[in-house]
Image (tube, helix red, strand yellow):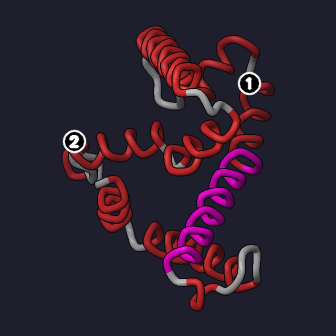
Amino acid sequence: MDDPAARKKLSLFDATLLVMGGIIGVGIFFNPHRIAERVPASGPYLALWIFGGLVAIAAGFTFAELGGSFPKAGGWFVYLRAAFGPFAAFLFAWVVLCVQSAGAIASIAKFFAQQLHVLAPALVGDADSSGQRAAAALLVLGVTVVALLGIKRAALLQNACML
C-alpha cells in the first residue's frame, strides 16, 4: 500500500460533501426556530444571520491562511502546537475528542430522536422518554457500525444525509 493512488478512497464529490456536512452540521435544522423565538422581528433576525455568515466567512479565511502557512495534516493540532507548544495542542485534541465531539454526537442523536417522535410518536414514545433515548442510542450505534464497515460505506451514508 505504498502507492498513494491505491490508498485513495474518497472521490472529490465525497470529500466535498464531507466538508459541507462538517460546516453546516445539524444545527441548521433546529437553530433558526430557536433564534426566531428570541428575535421575533424579521429585520434583526436577518441581521443576525448576516452577521453569523460574516463571522463564518472570516473563520474560513483564517483557516485558509493557516492552512497555507502550515502545509501539514492535522488542522487545529498543528496550529496550536506551533503557537502554544505540544502539551497545549495535546490537551486541546483530547478535549475535542472527549467533550466536543461526544457532545455534538449526543446533540445530533437527540435531535434525530425528537424528529422521529414528531413523525412516528408511537414508535419512540413521549418526549424525553426512554424510547427517544433508545432511538438516539441506536442511531449512534448504527452510524458507528457503518463507519466500521469502511470509508466507502461511511461516505455513502454521509452523501445520502447531505443530499
Please tell me how many numbered marks the rendered image carries: 2
Taking depth in this image into account, of 50 and 60 the one nearest to the observer is 50
Residue 81 at x, y = what percent? 68, 20
Mark 2 secondary-structure assignment: helix
Magenta segment main secondary structure: helix
Residue 162 at x, y = what percent? 34, 53
Q: Which residues are magenta?
A: 98-119
Rendered position, 36 above or below 134 = above
Taking depth in this image into account, of 129 and 40 the one nearest to the observer is 40
Label 1: how many residues lie within 10 Å, few (<14), some (14-19) or many (20+)?
Answer: some
Can residue 102 be found in the magenta stretch? Answer: yes
Quadrant of the frame with the C terminus: bottom left
Looking at the image, which residue is at 59% across and 84% down? Answer: 121
Looking at the image, which residue is at 55% across and 45% down? Answer: 27
- Which is more N-terminal, label 1 or label 2? 2
Label 2: how many residues lie within 10 Å, few (<14), some (14-19) or many (20+)?
Answer: few
